[in-house]
Amino acid sequence: MYFESFSDFLAMGGHAKYVWIAYGIALVVFAFNILAPIIKRKRLMAEQARQLRREELHASGS
Amino acid sequence: MWRWFHKLGSPKWFYAISGRWIPWFAVTALVLLVLGTVWALMFAPPDYQQGNSYRIIYIHVPAAFLAQSGYVLMAVAGAIGLIWKMKLADVVAKCCAPIGASFTFLALVTGAVWGKPTWGAWWVWDARLTSMLVLLFLYLGVVALQSAFTDRNQAARASALLSLVGLVNIPIIKYSVEWWNTLHQPASLTLTEKPTMPAEMWVPLLIMVAGFYCFFAVVLMMRTRVELLDRERRTGWVKEIINDKRTGKA
C-alpha cells in the first residue's frame, strides 16, 4: 500500500480528478459492453416468444 | 481439419460451445480485473516523474491493445467470411465493431485525461493520437456500413472490404512513435525487450491486459450469440431454445 490513509488514496497525490475520471469512464465502457447484448437478447427472446405463440394460435384456429 | 472448420462455422454448434466457455472466461476476467485494479491503484509505486496520474496507464494501455487486436480480428474474420462464405465469421466481424469502437474510445479518452496533467493539453495532433482517432472512425465506419444494407451478405462484404483496407492503419499506429517525432511516450511493454519499468509496475499492467482480453472474449461471444439467434430465428434449434425458455417460465 503506497498511501498513508484512505483520504490520501482518494486524493491520488493531487491527481484525483484525472485518475478517477479515467477509471470511471472505464467502468462505463465495461458496463455498456455487458449490458448491450443482455438487453438485445431479452428483447429478441420476448419478440420471438410472441411470434411463436401467434403461430401456434393460428395453427390451432385453422 | 476441414470437418473441424465446418463444425466451427455451424451457428448451432458455436452457440452451444460458447455457452459453456462464457462462464470460465467471465470468472477469469473478473478475477484478473479486480486483482489488477487493486494492485494498480493501491500497491503499484507512484511514478517518479508523473506521480499518481500515471496509474491511468493500467486502463489506457490495455484498452489501446484491445482496440488494435479487436480490429485485426474483425478484419481477419471479415476476410474469412469473404473468401469461404462462412456465416459465423461474418457475424463475429460484425460483433467486433461496436466493442472495438468502445475500447478505442476508452483509449482516446483516458489518453486525454492523462495528457492534461502530463503534457498540459487534452489533445495534440500527434501521430499516435491521430492514427488512433482514425482507428475509431474505421470502427464507426464498419458499424455504419453494417446497418446501411438490408441484405446481410452485402453488409458483410462491404464491411469486410473496409476493415481490410483499414488494416494499413495498424502498423501506422504501432510505429507512429518511432517514425515521427511525437509527444507520446514509446511502448512500455514489448515482446522482445525487457520492460522499462520495475516489476511492481508492469506485473499489474500485464494482469490488466490479460483481464481486458478475457473480457473482450466474453462480450464478443455474448454479442455473437444474440446475433446468431436473431439471424437463425426461423430455424428449429432457435425455436427450441425460445420454447424451452417459455415453458421454463410458465
Image: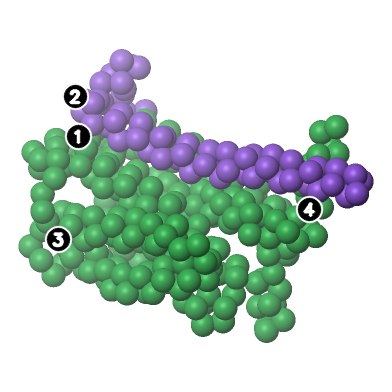
Q: Depth-wise, is mark 3 or mark 2 nearer the camera?
A: 3
Mark number displayed over residue B127: 3
Q: Do circles 4 and 1 both sit on a common chain?
A: yes
Q: Return the residue at label 4.
A: B239
Q: Do circles 2 and 4 both sit on a common chain?
A: no
Q: Return the residue at label 2.
A: A14
- Give the amino acid type for the residue marked by disc 2 in the picture: Gly
Provide residue B73's location: percent of width, then percent of height: 45, 66
Position of residue B215 relative to residue B181, above or below, is: above
Q: Is residue A24 visible?
A: yes
Q: Do circles 2 and 1 both sit on a common chain?
A: no
Q: Do circles 3 and 2 both sit on a common chain?
A: no
- Disc 2, disc 1: CB below 8 Å? yes
Gap in Å between the C-alphas at discs 4 and 1? 57 Å
Provide residue A32's location: percent of width, then percent of height: 46, 39
Q: Do circles 3 and 4 both sit on a common chain?
A: yes
Gap in Å between the C-alphas at discs 3 and 2? 29 Å
Gap in Å between the C-alphas at discs 2 and 1? 9 Å
Alpha-carbon neighbours of circle 3 within 10 Å: few (<14), some, or many (≥20)?
many
Palette colour of chain B: green
Position of residue B95 relative to residue B172, above or below, is: above
Q: Return the residue at label 1.
A: B51
Residue occupying the point 73% across, 64% down: B13
Alpha-carbon neighbours of circle 2 within 10 Å: few (<14), some, or many (≥20)?
few
Gap in Å between the C-alphas at discs 1 and 3? 26 Å
- Disc 2, disc 4: CB below 8 Å? no
Which chain is purple in the rendering? A
Provide residue B150's location: percent of width, then percent of height: 50, 62
Q: Depth-wise, is mark 4 or mark 1 nearer the camera?
A: 4
**Left or right of B32: which side holds B182?**
left
